[in-house]
């Protein structure tokens, strides 16, 4: 029933992303998404540790 995403589907998704956000906005969106996923994983683990970037600044 369900199958993995193939190359044509991946290309279509990337094309739609470029059309929606523009080429310059995609790295910012990806960075925000990555930080959100990282925060979500940390909250699931129950760790209250600050990320390495915040430790350096503090």
Image: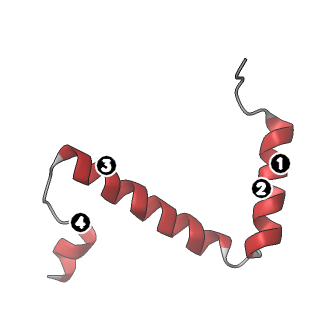
Task: Please report contact status of discs 2 and 1: CB closer than 8 Å, yes or no.
Answer: yes
Crowd around label 1: few <14 · some 14–19 · many ≥20 (10 Å): few
Residue tagged 2? 14
Q: Position of residue 25 (x, y in %)?
A: 67, 77
Residue tagged 3? 41
List the single residue furthest toward the bottom: 57
**What's the distance in space between the residues labelled 4 and 2, CA to CA?**
31 Å
| First in residue order: circle 4 vs circle 1 | 1
Crowd around label 2: few <14 · some 14–19 · many ≥20 (10 Å): few
- Residue 11, numbered label: 1
Label 3 element class: helix
State which quadrant residue 29 falls in.
bottom right
Residue tagged 4? 52
The image quadrant where one finds the N terminus is top right
Q: Which dot, 3 or 1, sits closer to the camera?
A: 3
| First in residue order: circle 3 vs circle 2 | 2
**What's the distance in space between the residues labelled 3 and 4, CA to CA?**
15 Å
């Amino acid at each position: 029933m369900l199958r993995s995403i193939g190359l044509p589907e991946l290309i279509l998704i990337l094309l739609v992303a470029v059309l929606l956000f523009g080429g310059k906005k995609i790295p910012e969106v990806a960075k925000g998404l990555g930080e959100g996923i990282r925060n979500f994983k940390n909250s699931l683990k129950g760790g209250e540790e600050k990320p390495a970037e915040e430790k350096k600044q503090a």
